[in-house]
Amino acid sequence: MIRVFENTDISTRNSFHVHQRAAKIVEFDYNEELPEVFATHVGEKWMALGGGNNILFTKDIDSTLVVPCNKDIEIVGKEDGRVTVRVGAGLEWDEFVEWCVERELWGVENLSLIPGKVGAAPVQNIGAYGAEVKDCITRVEMFFPEQGNFITLAAEHCGFGYRESVFKHSLKGRVIITSVEFCLSETPHPKLGYGDVIQQVEELGGATLSNIRKAICSIRRNKLPDTTVTGNAGSFFKNPIVDSSIAESLLEQYPDMPHYPAGVEGKTKLAAGWLIDKCSLKGYSKGNVGVHHKQALVLINTTGEATGCEVIEFAKMVQKSVFDKFGIEIDTEVNII
Ligand SMILES: Cc1cc2nc3c(=O)[nH]c(=O)nc-3n(C[C@H](O)[C@H](O)[C@H](O)COP(=O)(O)OP(=O)(O)OC[C@H]3O[C@@H](n4cnc5c(N)ncnc54)[C@H](O)[C@@H]3O)c2cc1C
């Protein structure tokens, strides 16, 4: 089924809850409907929209927002303790994680409670608590409106990196992801070495899938603002990756500065939240925008009345403060439209 909405308020379709309007929104339930969606309802300008949890709208949208609603989960293969599952782009990501945990399938449990749809997960290669979705994705299926056909990309061709993929670069704005294929494991692979996870899992009675999910949900609920109450888009900034020599000279001045191997020789990843906190900005607010008091990476719509442009202005102030203090540039993680 295809549903079309015209001149619609989109404050409930973005987690910052900014009040903008979209000229047209088209939802579709079945991937097979996409040729008709594009032939009949979508003009030249369009954009894929999931749950709007990683987007900041700064203006009314004159293009068509295309929203996949296919929520099917299908087991497509089982071999040597590995289960391959094909999931519709419109399913809530966390419903998929819950589905896996209930069936004792390992792989995505550390990504519990990340808001958004399955179709958006490969776009920025969602990650949390030492896990990245790229490690479980085998294929991504998509519709390519320029050619009017469906194509499938194997994971090794998706250009996955830290919050990166081909869908943010050469395929940006050119494809609609329709389904994602994951390979999960029946053999336990607990990843507990991040933050307070190990301690909480032990308190719950050990490293079962269900305990890991419970621990991560509890840590996230404690630390991050609830988007239904306070508008935000999770981490507004990416952790900067710098030359290791720069990290070393900063460490001389700030020995307690968190730093991690960036996975690339000669590069070190720093914690943007720590840098922002050190600028005394945690909990700071101005006008309708603020830095969350528990997690400095998260910018919030403090009054519910913030505009996208106000959030951008505030973000620039944060970026400038970090640059002035540390000489480090922090980039935005959120898609700014
Ligand atoms: C409170 C909170 C916590 C968060 N925590 C994390 C975290 O721990 N780790 C993390 O990685 N992210 C986190 N995020 C960011 C966000 O949850 C993810 O980026 C998520 O994948 C966004 O999903 P969405 O469906 O809302 O995508 P949207 O915001 O709707 O879209 C994001 C981008 O993907 C594109 N897109 C969406 N669907 C499709 C599709 N089907 N085909 C092609 N392109 C598409 C959009 O055009 C847009 O560019 C958090 C966000 C919030 C609000």
Image (cartoon, grey):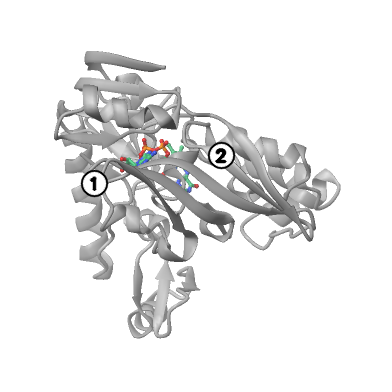
**Image mark count:** 2
Q: Residue placed at 31% from the left, 56% from the top? A: 279
Q: Which circle, 2 or 1, is nearer the viewer? A: 2
Mark 2 to mark 1 CA distance (whole Å): 35 Å
Q: Position of residue 63 (x, y in %)?
A: 17, 29
Check the image and report above or below for 13 versus 166: above
Estimate the x, y position of residue 76 in percent, counting from the top left: 65, 45
Camera-side residue of 69 and 312: 69
- Which disc number belongs to residue 13? none
Image position of 205 (left or right of 57): right
Q: Quadrant of the N terminus?
A: top left
Going by the numbered disc 1, the residue's amino acid type is: Ala
Q: N-terminal of the two: label 2 or label 1?
A: 2
Q: Is residue 16 visible?
A: no
Q: What residue lies at 22% left-to-right and 22% top-to-bottom?
A: 40
- Does ligand 1 reach within 8 Å of label 2's beta carbon? no
Name the residue tied to disc 1.
Answer: 315
Under tag 2, what secondary structure? strand
In the rendered image, the vertical position of residue 263 relative to residue 272, given as above or below: below
Circle 1: element type: helix
User: Is residue 205 among the parts visible in the rendering?
Assistant: yes
The residue shown at (31%, 38%) is: 55
The amino acid marked with disc number 2 is: Val
Q: Quadrant of residue 192?
A: bottom right
Q: Residues within 10 Å of mark 2 (few under 14, many from 20)?
A: many
| Residue 333 rendering spot, x and y as whole percentages | 33, 51
Question: The C terminus is located in which quarter?
Answer: top left
Q: Position of residue 149 (x, y in %)?
A: 33, 43
Q: For mark 2, what is the residue? A: 87
Q: Quadrant of residue 67?
A: top left
Dot 1: within a 10 Å radius of its alpha carbon, few (fewer than 14), some, or many (20 or more) residues? Answer: many
